[in-house]
Amino acid sequence: MRVLALDNFITGSPQNLEPLQGNPEFEFRQADVNHGVFIGGDVRYVLHFASPASPPQYDANPIHTLKVGTIGTMNMLGLARAKNATFLLASTSEVYGDPLVHPQPESYWGNVNPIGPRGCYDEAKRCAEAYAMAYRRMHQVDTRIIRIFNTHGPRMQVQDGRAVPNFMAQAIRGEPLTVYGDGSQTRSLCYVSDLVRGVIAALERGDEQPVNLGNPEEVTVLELAETIIRLAGSKSRIDHRELPVDDPKQRRPDITRARKLLGWQPEVGLEDGLRRTLEYFRSVL
Ligand code: UDP
């Protein structure tokens, strides 16, 4: 199958595409989906992953983040409609906000602050989900919605700003690990290869209802920092910093639906995944 990738590099980088150069099945075009994209020929799948996804990055680009979740999503749904293609929306666990239900099933409607610093991302993704459902109802577009929980892996940017790249870069450099707040907030980290299998399973076997994709292995942020120090064999210490506004206190996917509908579950354990990502950061730092 041929793949055409579009990116405006607002958070990505051309270097990440180097391994694909010369592959006759792969084509790249620098483009911003907010401005509409015109593609000749047949398209079977439209996978809409465009958006900053790191809190400091969407905080730095709030209007762009809102636009890509709304206008960008509308444009990609329009493309899918015109091509009679299946559309997949990369939604997020952020639609649950700072969740009052734990772990989070897809049936939970969430606890989102629309006017806080995370609102530009959370509400744009919630709007994107509404768009997908509207195009399905109005225009019978074949849609999928995946809600991606915290994921990590090779080729994340060193400057990404999320916990895993920050902690790994800090541990490798021997700098203090910046744990926000007391570190008792929890996350559940999925390794990228598991996520990719889930994306393909959702395309092939999914339905119109949202499905969580993530690893239910939950850790506190402090445990995550300590684990990364240990795996890196680092002498770094931990430096507590101010907790960002509206930082979710707990997050763990309920993946019952993904297991039943897609026959999918993560296979890479937390430490195994962290070791693989760490190897990447060592190779670039
Ligand atoms: N975090 C941290 N130090 C950092 C970066 C993040 O303690 O240098 C915390 C952050 O406050 C949050 C968790 O790690 O509680 C996960 O943050 P991340 O930015 O990776 O993603 P989020 O799950 O908040 O979207």
Image (cartoon, grey):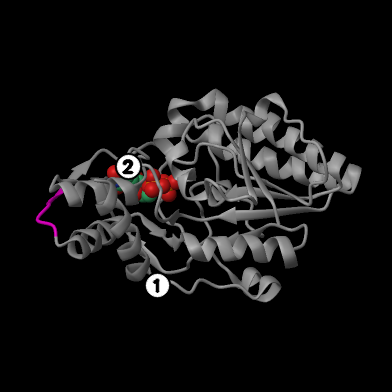
Q: Are marks 1 and 2 in contact (CB under 8 Å)?
A: no
Q: Which residues are magenta?
A: 234-238
Query: In the picture, which quadrant includes the C terminus?
Result: top left
For image coordinates 90% across by 42% down, the residue present is 138
Residue 117 visible somewhere in the drawing: no
Looking at the image, is 72 positioned above or below residue 26? above
Between 281 and 3, which is closer to the camera in this rendering? Answer: 3
Looking at the image, is 130 positioned above or below residue 33? below
For image coordinates 58% across by 69% down, the residue present is 255
Residue 77 visible somewhere in the drawing: yes
Q: Residue furthest right?
A: 139
For image coordinates 19% across by 59% down, the residue present is 229
Q: Residue furthest left?
A: 235
**Sequence-first disc among 1 and 2:** 2
Q: Which residue is mark 2?
A: 158
| Disc 1 residue crowd, few under 14, some 14–19, many 20+, Cα 10 Å | few
Q: Is residue 142 left or right of residue 205?
A: right
Q: Which residue is mark 1?
A: 269
Which kind of residue does numbered mark 1 sit on?
Gly
